[in-house]
Structures are given as structure tokens and as C-alpha cells.
Amino acid sequence: MAIASLLIANRGEIAVRIIRAARDLGIRTVQVYSQADAESLAVQLADSAVEIGPPAAAKSYLNIEAVLAAARESGADAVHPGYGFLAENPGFADAVEAAGLIYVGPKGATIRLLGDKIAAREAASKAGVPTVPGSPDRIDDPAAALDLAARIGFPVLIKATAGGGGRGIRVAKDRTEFSRLAPLASAEAKAAFGDGGIYIEKLIQKARHIEIQVLGDGDRVVHFFERECSLQRRRQKVWEEAPAATLPGDMRRELCAAAVALAQSVNYRGAGTLEFLYDDDAKEFYFLEMNTRIQVEHPVTEFVTGIDLVREMIRIAQGEPLALRQEDIQLNGHAIECRINAEDPANDFMPAPGSVTALRVPGGPGVRFDSMLYPGCEIPPFYDSLLGKLIVWDNTRAGALRRLQGALSELEISGVSTTAPLHRALAADEDVRSANFHTRFLEQWLERNDISPA
């Protein structure tokens, strides 16, 4: 069924991105918004907009009934969840389809299966994909959990079975820390995701975070190679690249094949990302989880493959088979993305809502800035601090780094503090320039370096 009108159940830069992809397909767009986002760029760009509640996300962007009412009111026949908010909520996917609408993403049952970390690990094992040594099931007995952690070997990660974004994760270095931190991880997971279930994984020291982008139509799955997302702060990605700078070619092929095998085993439909830990020393990889949505960092993959992933996932949702064969998808050059957040890196990354008084966007060949910004826009304090993403491409990684430095020097966002100074410092760092980093690198780097305002 062709989509005539698409409702975007999200906000910020991803809402703008979806609006543009839908417009390219000749699809009318409907933007939902909270009272705090009435003047947002997405509201201005969409063909129509519907208010769904007060600023608090629980009463607006997370309110399934309000979103469905907006779809009925606007005459939309499809819903795109973006990322975050309801994007990985299987009940929302089910409710959208029960209302007779098209959900741009996987079936609720698929989200439910892969959104549970334990079930996803089981699915990976059945598909022959290696997983990090850890608990075979969710843990409810603290004493049994402690014994298992000791058998796995410290340090271990205590992780929430639901959710993502680094919430509900603690590192326990010994039995004493485990006993103290396990209840905290469970409580945080309960507060964030409504599920306090936890499980244990072995902590891989100096691991790289590698993820594989896939698209499926329910029958066939293709991959779009890998991204490296090892530069993280508090398990939140800060800087992403495609392809991974130091990944051997044979390991790339193995990772991509594993990702396709797992997605194919669940008849995956839509855009998805399979996340792995890569042990640089042992040259081994382990499946972590699958994100059943479009990722924040999808633009670097679009740059190196030349394929609009958001447009393709809309096409799949309206019943079109995959238009791409695996051999059609080729790597070309290198892309880097910097997340620009409304945070003050000189003040422990304190959130910095406010009004954007001036804006200068970098340009030129191989430069892209996906954002929600315009001069005079308000950055509300109620949501994630992501303002936009600065993405660059060049034939080589060295060229991409030079282009990134030039683009960062052009970027000007006045009125609010941003993380742009952090990225300027990282782009000049010798370890970053030589891709000599891992998932704990950035936090260690921040302990040694002061970030001064631009």
C-alpha cells in the first residue's frame, strides 16, 4: 500500500530528516509536537502539524493515545517513530497497526524479541553469532547473580535487559562492588524502562564498538558495512565513523555476514543496526544487541554508500521489496560524524538549553549538517540535548579529518553552549587521528584534557 501521508512521531533533527526523505518520495508529512516545540523547525517544514500535549515527554511524545489521535485527526496513513521515545516500543508498533496504519519499522513481535537483551542473545546464538560471555537469562536472585559474576570473572558489566542509551549499566570490579551496584542498575532500569531486569556480561577491556547497518524487507536482508562508534562518554556515542579505520578486511566480511545471518533469522523488516564489541588484541567479535530503528549515526553510512536509508525504510514499509542487491552496495571513501549537543564540555557537560542567537552552518563538498536549528530557535530543557550532527566525507580518512577541522572552524552556534569545542580538540588529537582508541578512551582522555570554550 502506497503511503500518502506520513505522521512523524518524534522531534528534533530526526523529524526534520524524515520530513525531507518523505518529501523526496512525494509523501505528505504530519508533525506531532509538544507545547514546548510549537515553533520547532520540524513543525515549520511539515505539511501540517498537530499538538499532542504539554512539554513533558510522558504526556506528549511518549503518549501513544495522543499520537494515534493525531494520526486520526490528520488523516495520516503511516507513522514513522524515528529514534528514541516510542521507536523501540513493541506496544506502540502493535497499536499503530491495530489502528489500521502502516508502521515504518519492524513488527511489534520483532521489536519485542530483539529489544530484550537476553532474547536477542539467544537469537544470536541460534544464528551462530558469537556473544559476550555472560548470564544465559535475566537475573532475579542476587546471591546467584554474584556467584555467576565470580565464575565469569571480574570485571563484569551489569546491564538492563530492556532499553538502551547506556542506562542501567554498571561496571563491577569485584564481589563487593557487584553487591553494591546490582541493585542500583536494576533501580535505574526500572525507572527508565519500566523493567528492572538485569543480566551480566564479561567486560572486554579496550574493546572497539563496531556496528553493522542492515535493511530487510521481511524476506531478504542486505548490509551496508560497518560504523565505528568507540568514542563514547558514559556509554553515549559522541563521534562515529564509516568504515572502521583499523578493521581488517576479513573481519569486516565476518561481521557483516554475522549481522545478515541474525537479521535474516528473524525475517527482519526495515532499518536496523547490529552492535558488536571487537577485541582488537584477540581479533574476535561479540554480538551486543540489535537496535530495531534508524540510528542517530546513519548519515555516515549514507555518505560512504550513496544510499538514502530513511527513504529506503519508507519504501519497504509501504510494501516494496528491497530494491538493492548486496553487490550493488559498495564502500566509497570515509565519513565522520560529530554529535553537536547543547552541553557545556568545560563544565562537566552541563545541559545548556536556551535561545540560539546566531547560526553559521558549514558547507562545501562532502559536508552535511543535519540539525533542528535556525537563528532564534529555542532549545527546551525537557528532552535529549542533541542539536544536530556535523558529517563530513572524503576519499580517505586523513582527508575526512582535514575536512572535519575546516567544517568545525566554520560552525557557529551562539546563545547556547555546545560540544563543538570538544570535537575541535578531538579532531586535532594524535591518537584520534591515528584511530588509536577504544570504548573507554574518551573518558580517560577527558581526565587529562581541559575543554575550553570556542
Image (cartoon, grey):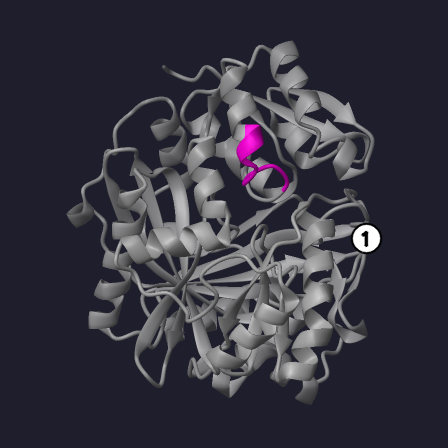
With 165 as the anchor, is 130 left or right in this view? left
Residues packed near mark 1 inside 10 Å, few (<14), some (14 to 19) or many (20 plus): many
Q: Which amino acid does the dot numbered 1 rest on?
A: Pro
Q: Is residue 146 above or below residue 205?
A: above
Any part of residue 339 in sight: yes
Rendered-image quadrant of the C terminus? bottom right
Is residue 412 inside the magenta stretch?
A: no
Residue occupying the point 20% across, 71% down: 250
Q: Is residue 100 above or below residue 79?
A: above
Is residue 89 inside the magenta stretch?
A: yes
Any part of residue 360 in sight: no
- Residue placed under numbered mark 1 in the picture: 353
Residue occupying the point 36% across, 14% down: 1
Residue 294 pos. (x, y %): 47, 44
* Disc 1, SS: loop
Residue 377 pos. (x, y %): 77, 42
Where, by quadrant of the figure, is residue 34 drawn? top right
Closest to the observer, 46 or 253: 253
Q: Give, as a single range, the part of the protein colored magenta.
A: 85-92
